[in-house]
Image: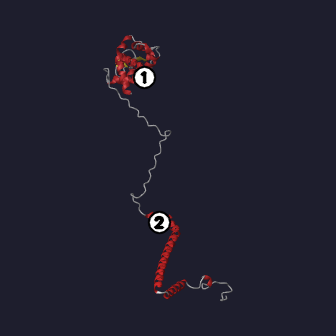
Amino acid sequence: MRDDRTLDHQITPGDPIDRSDDTPSHDRSAGIRSAGAYARMLLPGPVRARVALATGVLCCLGLAAVAEGARDDSADAAPVAAPSVLAERAEPDPASRNLERHPATASPTPASPTPAADPDTTPAPKKTKRKPVDPAPVAGLDNAQMENAEAIVRTGRKMGMPRRALVIAVATAMQESNLYNVASGVLPESQNYPHQGIGWDHDSVGLFQQRSSSGWGEVGQLMDPEFATRQFLSALAQVPGWQQMRLTDAAQAVQVSAYPEHYAKHEWRATEVVEAILEAGQ
């Protein structure tokens, strides 16, 4: 390769194209200052003083201008650096992830909202079934008699019979068996079942002294207080107009007793017993 710098049109740092003036800037400033000093020496004394003063003022103004320009340059340079600063701020500080957060400075975690109850899917609260309470004996009855009266009232309510029918049934049992579940001495079979006494009125058994020979049911069935009550109330329901009858007439229509008026004397006691049982079961 040739080194005359003409074949390849290469430009070296020393070429004139690098500057618009061959004189360095510091040489030009020194020359200007030397020329000013020489001119001041040629002037008279008072004039030189005024020139010196003016020159000092100009120098001060120049310095002020230079300082202002420096401030302007620094102000202009600030926005240039802003994007990099913003970029640094945008990036999370890796060390901050490892800093321990204290409860006093940590942001509180919002509580999860409680889902509203859906009335279509929320099960209804279960109603606690009240346990029946055995009422204390009333109207001069003992515990066994009161329990038998409860069996009559409970069975009648299951059948949907009104209160009046319950009073008629209890009064009838008071007359027939004194509210005891009685077996028959004539019918030894009846004594094989739970009983509270023995009667001798033919083959009559149970609370209502019903007879199996008359078609009321089997002996074992008639010794069951609930079965005997259903038999009596079912027969009462078939008596026309029994609701308007006197108690003794309604009972006699079912029992066909030799003493039809005897049922009436038990009405007030039967009413008191039924009321006590119903109130206890509410």
Question: Percent x, y for residue 185?
Answer: 36, 18
Foreground pick, 205 / 138: 138
If you read the primary sequence from the N terminus, does the residue marked by circle 2 or circle 1 appear first? 2
> In 3D space, how far apart are the residues under numbered discs 2 and 1 (Cα atoms)?
85 Å
Residue at screen point 48% across, 87% down: 44
Tell me if residue 85 can be seen: yes
Tell me if residue 193 can be seen: no
Which quarter of the picture shows residue 204? top left
What label does residue 94 carry, if any? Answer: 2
Instruction: Indicate the amino acid at tag 1.
Output: Gly
Question: Percent x, y for residue 95?
Answer: 45, 66
Foreground pick, 260 / 118: 118
Residue 249 position (above or below residue 127) = above
Foreground pick, 142 / 271: 271
Q: How many marks?
A: 2
For the N terminus, the quadrant is: bottom right
Residue at screen point 62% across, 82% down: 17
Q: Residues within 10 Å of mark 2 (few under 14, many from 20)?
A: few
Residue at screen point 44% across, 19% down: 233
Question: Percent x, y for residue 160?
Answer: 45, 23
Query: Residue under circle 1?
Result: 156
